[in-house]
Structures are given as structure tokens and as C-alpha cells.
Amino acid sequence: QIEPLKQNFAQLNTYTQQLYTSIQQIEPLKQNFAQLNNFTQQLNASTQKQFELLRQQLGELDAETKKITTNCQQPITKLDAIHQRLEQVENFTKQLNTNTQQQIQPLRQYVTQLNAYTQGFNKNTEKQLEEFKYAIALLQTEMQNLAESLTQTEQRLSQEVAEKVKQPQVKITIPTPVKSQPQNTILHIQPSETAKTGTKQALPPVEIAPPTTQIQKSKSLSSLRGHTERVVSVAFHPNSVAPEKRILASGSHDKTIKIWRLDTQENRTLTVSGKVNSIAFSPDGKVLACGHDDKTVKLWDVDTEREICNFIGHKEKVYAVAFSPNGKIIASGSQDKTIKLWSLDEQKEIYTLTGHLDEILCVAFSPNNRLVASGGGERDQTIKIWHLTQDKFLTLKGKSGTLGRIYSICFSPDGTTLASGHQDKIIRFWDVETGREISNITGHNDEVYAVAFSPNGKKLASGSYDGNLKIWQIDTGEELNHITIGEGAIYCVAYSPDGKILATANGDKTVTLVNLESRTTQRYKDIEIEKGFD
């Protein structure tokens, strides 16, 4: 990683030498200035002579005029000579102006060339600085990985030395294996390394009993229809707790955002200029933020449906947006490999986070406002936790080494755990403080596009490209519910503030609502939806 940095320094030295060469080219310009000064002095002397000659001629003209006045009979042939002299003076003046312009023209050309070179040098310098920043971010990531590797090696060596000194007698008890059952999901627990190092384990290992997800009566499902392209993001209004006041927003690739009243299923439509990739309500529910394919982040007044402002700064598509818990900052992740932080009060960009090697697919704020988590694309395959108050970031590394694309991340309500959905069909749980993988869940048949903690933090909902919605018990890893939503993918899942409703954004252009309390099947229009938890 340092080698490209050396090359960049070599390029900077080359540009510096070119600058010195250009400075040397200014020397002829100085000589031209000196010549111009000499020419001006000569011009002044010549002009004085010409004026003196003109005065003499005027004196002669005055004398001749007096003679003509006194003696009108005398020939006035000398007037022709005076006219000729005046024409000569006029021609000399024109020639003098022409020579002056010719002398100044090379000087103007030199100044124009110098300005053009200065502008080009400034652009090259800015480009080199951007490359240096990017290289430094890569170097920081590798240094962090190296430090983590050295820490692990030191701990392992310390343990080996302690074992050799103490030679303890370890009795290993192998538990009776549990017979695998259909639909059973295994929670992979972090090895006992965390116990050795004394790190607090957020999810303790448990022995998974046979699945309790026996076939249940269908819970109430309903579909919200109105979008003409796939729905990729849903968000509940934070104050919509009462059933008659529940409000849900949905964003689609049809370039619209719909705000639904769930009791009547009526909606209001906001039309935007690009495909909608992500939406988020402010904590007070008054503002709705959305990220677009048109490289912008737009803010809308929920009540008046008026566009408040349009944040412009990303160079590529915006894939993810998130509000800070205090509602003062918005984070946005983009295809341009950056996360930008925007001030809602000042309505402008306040910071740019760089360090990922590929596009940013998801962002999330921690409950305490101090952290921002982000997930990268296939060429990056890392999750980073940014410490906003300390100007540093933590790169999360999985046990398998490769994470694939990170499609979705979310903090637990207490802020100690981070959940993530991955391209490799796995759901992972991370310790926010140490950045270590605590455990993981397998059960989906395809890429996991969405994860969401329940409001009480005890359950996790996940949606996949396979069209299945699953609900997990976090402390045991047990699969509680399994609902096949449809043939299309599930791109986003969201819990209502009271945890009684679960919404999914679907690839079949619909939004599905799951009533987690009702156990009856409802019919809407001419469509009957009967989905069991088999």
C-alpha cells in the first residue's frame, strides 16, 4: 500500500520540477518588461523632440500667419508646407501607436500562457491531493487490520505460554447432538476465545432445541398496491402507534414516494426526478428524507408535501439515507464510495467520510448519536463503524474472511450489537465496541437484503432475495416465523414503533403488512392471501 504512495510523491516531485521550469520561463518575460521600460524611456525622449519640433513649427506657423495678415498679397505657398508637416506628425503618431501595440502583444501572450499553466497546475495538484487522501485511508485500514492481527497473535501466544506453564487438566464434555429437523436454523456462536480474553459476550452460546416453529394459523397479511415498479424501501412514521394513526412511507423505482394511512389504505404521492433507493423519517416524524439515482438527497415536509431542500454533493447514485436519533444530521451513502453528513439546521454538507473501496449500500446511526455504520459493495466487503467525535473508524472483519456485499445493517436498541445482512445468505451479529463477530444465523436460500431489530431488541426480522420473511429469536437463534411473501425479492423490512406490524418492500411492486398479533386470514379486494409459517 505504501508503494503507490511513493509513486504519488514521485509524481509530485515531477510536477514541482515542471513548476520550477515554468518559473524559469518567466525570466524572458522580465527581460521583455525591461525592454518595454527602455522603449518607453526612448519613446518619451523621442516624443519630447517631436513636441519641440512641433512647437517650432507652430512658432513658424504663427509668424507666417502674422505675415499673411499684414501682407495678404504675399504668396501663401508656405501653407502647403505646414499642412505637409501636420500630416507627417499625424502619421508619426499612428506609427507610434502601432509599434506600441506590437511591443505589448508578446507580453499579453506570455501573461495568458502563465495563467493557463497556473490553472492546469492547480487542477493537477487537487487531483494528487485526492489520490493521497484515498491512499492514506487505505493505509489506515491496513494498519488497523495489522494491529488487530498483532493483538490476536499476542493473546494466542500468551495463552499458549500460560497453558505450558500451568499444564491444566481439561475435561471436555461433548453434548448429545440434536437431530436436524426441517426448517431448523443453527446459530453459529463465537468460539471460546472471547471467554479467554475476558470480553463480554453479548449473545451467550446456547444449545438449540428442536424447532418450535410448528405450523401456525395464518397471521393477518395485507398488500398495499399502487407503485408501478419494485418497492425498495419502507419506513413507519415514528409517532404512528395508535391503529387509526399508523402511517407508512414507501419508496419505489417508479420515481415516487407514497405516504399511506394504514387504516384506510389511502395514500399521498410525492414525485421525484430519479429512482428512489432509500427513505427515512426524522425522529419527530415531520421530515422525510430520500436518496435518489439523480445523486441527490431530498427532504420533504410530511404534512404539506412540500420539498424543503435538496442536498447536492455526491458524484454518483445515493443508495442509503439515515437520520441521527437527535434529528440534526442526515447520513447518506453513495455509489461514489463516500458517506456524507448533512446538517438539517444549516441545510448543507458538514463532513465526508472516506475509506471504503467500493459503493456504499447501507448506513445506520447508533442510538447514542456517536457512531455511524456503513456497509460496502463487492470490491470492499467490509463494515465500518465511524466514531464521529474521535475522527476514527473501526473495520469489522468476519470469521470467514469474506463478507460479500453488505446490503443492510441496523443497531440494536441498546446500541451494543450491530446486525448485518449479506450476499452470502448469512445474517451476522457484531460487538460494536470491539468490532468482533459475535454470532451468525443461516437459514435463507439467497442473498439477505434486509434486517431490522424489533423495538424491544429481542427479535430480528430479515428479508431475502428468495422472497421469504423470517423472524428470529436473537438470544437463541431460533427461527420463530417464516412467511413466503411472494415471487419477488424482499428489499426492506421495518417494524412499527409498537412492534405489532411488520412491513416489507417487495420486488413485485407491493408493500406487505404482517399483523404480528392477529391470527386470521383477511381478504382485500379480490385477492386472498393465505401464508402459513411452514
Image: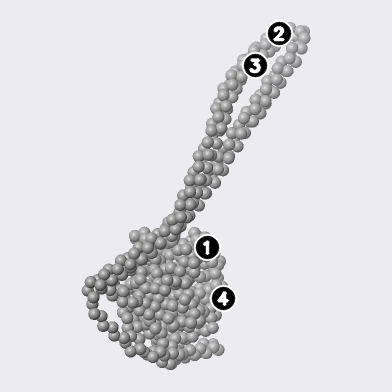
Q: Choose mark 3 or mark 4, whichever is in front.
A: 4
Q: Amino acid at mark 1?
A: Glu
The residue that disc 4 covers is 229
**As drawn, is 149 to the left or to the right of 315?**
left
Q: Amino acid at mark 2?
A: Lys
Q: Quick one: 249 or 203, which is closer to the camera?
A: 203
Q: SS at mark 1?
A: loop
The residue that disc 2 covers is 67
Q: Earlier in the sequence, mark 2 or mark 1?
A: 2
Q: SS at mark 2?
A: helix
Q: Amino acid at mark 3?
A: Leu
Residue plotted at (54% across, 69% down):
275
User: Is 267 placed above or below 19 here?
Assistant: below
**Disc 4 versus disc 2: distance between alpha carbons?**
104 Å
**Screen quadrant of the C terminus:** bottom left
The residue that disc 3 covers is 54
* Residue 263 screen position, x and y as percent: 46, 82
**Disc 2 versus disc 1: distance between alpha carbons?**
90 Å
Q: Amino acid at mark 4?
A: Glu
Q: Choose mark 1 or mark 4, whichever is in front.
A: 1
Residue plotted at (43% across, 65% down):
331
CB contact under 8 Å: marks 4 and 2: no
